[in-house]
Amino acid sequence: MKLILAIVQDKDSQQLQSKLVKAGFRATQLPSTGGFLKAGNCTFIIGVEDEKVDGALEIIKKNCHTRSQYVTPTFLMPEAASSLAEPIEVQVGGATCFILPVDKFVRF
Ligand code: 2BA
């Protein structure tokens, strides 16, 4: 068994959740915050059998989209406010996924 941790944008989370459930996956959604943008995102915890990992990743890939976001460097580096005022473009998403081995899984 594997544990997929998938960090996705809030905008994609509802659709992803319903597609995962429709395909028979069990998933838990946690509200989370990105360290760079300090904006809300969503972390999915999905426990899956080894042979179903690719199927779950395919659903994540299909339903999570890359978006551009503009950030002002002053937001990132307040000390550089005067010299770096132009917004910079950052590509966020589709999804950042970690696939971890599961030693044991029990449900009571
Ligand atoms: P954030 O940390 O808010 O990052 C948002 C986007 O900002 C990133 O998109 C990336 O394009 C950019 N970015 C992040 N750190 C950067 C840096 N040091 N310099 C320049 N640009 C930077 P994604 O890569 O798609 O990441 C989306 C979210 O996924 C992240 O939000 C974070 O919550 C999570 N994430 C990404 N990589 C991670 C990792 N290695 N470990 C844990 N969480 C991660």
Image (cartoon, rainbow, N blue to C red):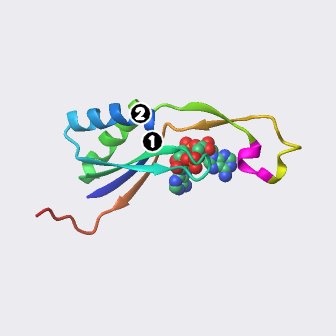
Toward the viewer: 80 or 52? 80
Give the extent of the magenta segment.
73-78
What's the residue type where badge 2 is placed? Asp
What's the residue type where badge 1 is placed? Val
Q: Tell me the number on the disc at residue 76.
A: none
Q: Tell me the number on the disc at residue 8.
A: 1
- The residue drawn where x is 88% and y is 44% is 82
Q: Residue furthest right?
A: 83
- Counting from the top left corner in percent of width and height, residue 57 is at 37, 41
Q: Is the residue 50 above or below the residue 55 in the image?
A: below
Alpha carbon separation for disc pair 1 and 2: 7 Å
Toward the viewer: 43 or 48? 43
- The residue drawn where x is 62% and y is 33% is 69
- The residue drawn where x is 27% and y is 47% is 27
- Counting from the top left corner in percent of width and height, residue 6 is at 41, 48
Give the overall secondary structure of the magenta segment.
Answer: helix
10 Å crowding of disc 2: few (<14), some (14-19), many (20+) = some
